[in-house]
Image (spheres, helix red, strand yellow):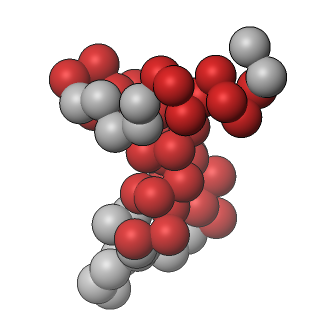
Amino acid sequence: MNRLFLSQMLQFSGAFATRGTFGGSTGEDQFASFLREEYAARLAERVQILPEAAFRAQTGG
């Protein structure tokens, strides 16, 4: 759950926006999500953003 949340926050933060003269190709747009997901997975291993109780309340479990 934390990985998904972090991935969405990274997406909307603009941290992976293309910059400069050589940025913004079609391939870069397609593969940026893989990089964002990897960053989110690594961050989720180290940081607990959402408490487990909130996750259980949302899923009904």
User: Residue 46: x, y in percent?
Assistant: 20, 23
Q: Does residue 1 lie above or below 12 as drawn?
A: above
Q: Does residue 60 lie above or below 30 as drawn?
A: above
Q: Residue at x 76, y 26 (%)?
A: 59
Quarter the N terminus occupies: top right
Q: Is residue 14 left or right of residue 8?
A: left
User: Residue 36: x, y in percent?
Assistant: 44, 45
- Would residue 40 be visible to someone looking at this image? no
User: Residue 43: x, y in percent?
Assistant: 28, 32
Q: Residue furthest right?
A: 60
Q: Residue at x 54, y 54 (%)?
A: 8
Disc tally is: 0
Q: Residue at x 59, y 61 (%)?
A: 29
Quadrant of res 44:
top left
Q: Does residue 39 lie above or below 56 as drawn?
A: below
30 and 46: which is toward the camera: 46
Q: Is residue 39 left or right of residue 54?
A: left
Q: Residue furthest top?
A: 61
61 and 32: which is toward the camera: 61
52 and 33: which is toward the camera: 52
Quarter the C terminus occupies: top right
Q: Residue furthest left?
A: 46
- Would residue 59 be visible to someone looking at this image? yes
Quadrant of res 55:
top right
53 and 28: which is toward the camera: 53
User: Residue 58: x, y in percent?
Assistant: 71, 34
Quadrant of res 18:
bottom left
Q: Does residue 26 lie above or below 34 as drawn?
A: below
Q: Is residue 9 left or right of residue 39?
A: right
